Image: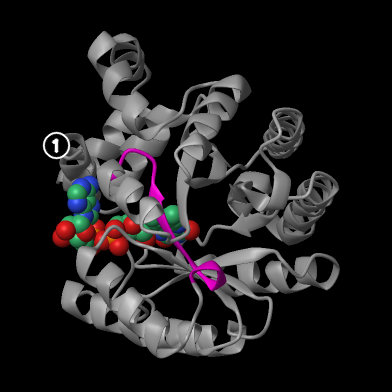
Amino acid sequence: MLRQTLLGMSRNDQLRQIIEQAPVSRDVVKRFVAGDQTPDAVRVAGELVETRRRVTIDYLGEDTLDPEQAAATTDAYLQLLGALAEAGLTVDGTVEVSLKLSALGQALGRDGHRIALYHARSICQTAANVGTTVTVDMEDHTTTDLTLATVRELRQDWPWVGVALQSYLYRTEEDCRDLAHEGSRVRLCKGAYKEPESVAFQDAGDVDRAYVRCLKVLLQGQGYPMVATHDPRLIEITSVLAAKAQRSPDSFELQMLLGIRPDEQLRLAGSGAQMRVYLPYGQDWYGYLVRRMAERPANLSFFLRGLATR
Ligand code: FDA
């Protein structure tokens, strides 16, 4: 019921205009989305870097069924990388980019894989030219195999290409084993999509326990784990497991979303941990926030809680 209402909201243009233009929405959205334009993303990234946080930037737009839109999204990334380099923010991967293959055309029928790979390659080449990295987000489970195949192809030229894995999928512990090799950057998150019981744990406790099993595999492996969670228990467990695996602070990083637990981000960065903030920007923020909430109603309380915390 809530899901249908939210999905309806995301497609209602009149409502979209009212919400987009209301001053209160802009204030709320500013908390979670850096702005509409490239300079907004560069400015907010620069502010985060000044407070010892690293950044990964996501240009909003997903599920593209239009080849021109996929090309425009790619251009936006190329422009962004140029602007970040000009601002001196790409050195040593301080600010990198995150991308969704569905925004680059993965869903464009039989040619989708080839088109998304082509666009992702040009983004990776530009990232390499300016000295930074790229991480590929993970979307719903129907795309997991294709996304991992694309990452494998990209890694042949750019071994530093990172990929997100979701602990709620039964398969992920095995994927972690496959990807825990030297130089392999893996972002571990719980997973944000509504998935069926046939492929994913439904119980939050099971998702958390799977997260810890995956963490163990990644931290004991030879790769570079990127621990993406706001969950205080999992962050505590990460520090215990990292010490046990004799990991130095620069051999893994913690990641959180823009606007969620900002004080904790600062505390962790100040304690010597590597902290990276996932920063979305772009005009498609309305669809992004409302669809995230519709996919998983728990996301609604997730964003509402984010407003209540410092
Ligand atoms: P969860 O939402 O279960 O919350 C656990 C606990 O954390 C809470 O009980 C509370 O203590 C604390 N907490 C959580 N939210 C809070 C808030 N708003 N304010 C205060 N405390 C809060 N997903 C995906 O499917 N594919 C992807 O590629 C990515 N990429 C990604 C990158 C990064 C950097 C992050 C942080 C997350 C993602 N995600 C993702 C989203 C991820 O899968 C997940 O949906 C959210 O991070 C929420 O899960 P948590 O692990 O934060 O815990």
Give coordinates of residue 290: x percent, y percent.
32, 36
Q: Name the residue located 40 percent from the left edge and 33 percent from the top edge.
A: 287
| Image quadrant where residue 188 sits | bottom left
Query: Is the CB atom of the residue marked by disc 1 within 8 angstroms of ligand 1's nearest atom?
Result: yes
Q: Is residue 249 above or below residue 214?
A: above
Q: Nearer the viewer, residue 83 or 191?
A: 83
Q: Nearer the viewer, residue 141 or 12?
A: 141
Q: Please give left or right for residue 179 compared with residue 253 in the image.
A: right
How crowded pointer 1 is (Cα within 10 Å; few <14, some 14-19, many 20+) is rated as few
* Coloration of the structure image: one colour
Residue 298 appearing in the image? no
Q: Name the residue located 35 percent from the left edge and 41 percent from the top edge.
A: 291
- Describe the element under mark 1 as helix, strand or loop: helix
Give coordinates of residue 229: x percent, y percent.
34, 61
Taking the view exactly as shown, the residue that stands out farthest to the front is 271
Q: Please give left or right for residue 139 compared with residue 96 in the image.
A: left
Q: Is residue 146 above or below residue 87?
A: below
Give coordinates of residue 301: x percent, y percent.
16, 46
Q: Name the residue located 58 percent from the left edge and 51 percent from the top edge.
A: 100
| Image quadrant where residue 61 sits | top right
Provide the residue designation for mark 1. Answer: 308
Give coordinates of residue 101: x percent, y percent.
63, 54
- Which residues lie in the magenta part? 249-261
* Residue type pointed to by label 1: Ala
